[in-house]
Image: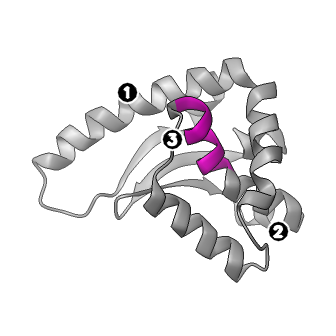
Amino acid sequence: MIALHFGIDVFAIEVINGKSQVSILQNDYNRMTSQERFIILAGGVAGECCFFKNHDLDGKRDDEIKLEKAGGGSIEDYLSDAMAILSANDGRFNRLNKELVRKWETAKLEAFFDAGPENYVLLSKSEIDLI
């Protein structure tokens, strides 16, 4: 939701090796400011706090490491901006989350019967655009 807010074209929300990620084009990534990148990284934790009233500690740590490597400092420095963007887009954010939860549950069930790595697309660009 935060990437979309900044005009970034999200072409998939995926799970790679069991971790969710937003896939964007390299050109979009290159035109973002550092501040926008950092707020997007904080968006996962902000979304979980808004929608689930908690957050995945492993996922948060992964985002914190990405922020630190990029020179962004603490994830808490960007949470209020991320939460404000989500709140301003709460209708679309709620629809996106409902669809993600539905897709994730189905994908987890399918992955249970598959011995391979947890790699799958939760939402494609066309599905995201419809929300």
Report crowding for label 3: few under 14, some 14 to 19, many 20 or more residues within 10 A (C-alpha).
few
| Residue, disc 1 | 102
Is residue 31 in sight in this rendering?
no
For residue 25: magenta?
no
Q: Is residue 128 above or below residue 27?
A: above
Name the amino acid type tagged 1. Answer: Arg
- Report x, y in % for residue 31: 88, 63
Q: To which residue does mark 2 refer?
A: 30
Q: Residue at x 12, y 60 (%)?
A: 115
Farthest top residue in view: 91
Q: Secondary structure at mark 3?
A: loop
Q: Residue at x 47, y 26 (%)?
A: 99
Rounded to the nearest angstrom, the CA distance separating label 1 from label 2 is 32 Å
Spatial CA distance of label 2 from label 3 is 31 Å
Q: Nearer the viewer, residue 42 or 20?
A: 42
Asked if the magenta segment contains residue 45, the reply would be yes
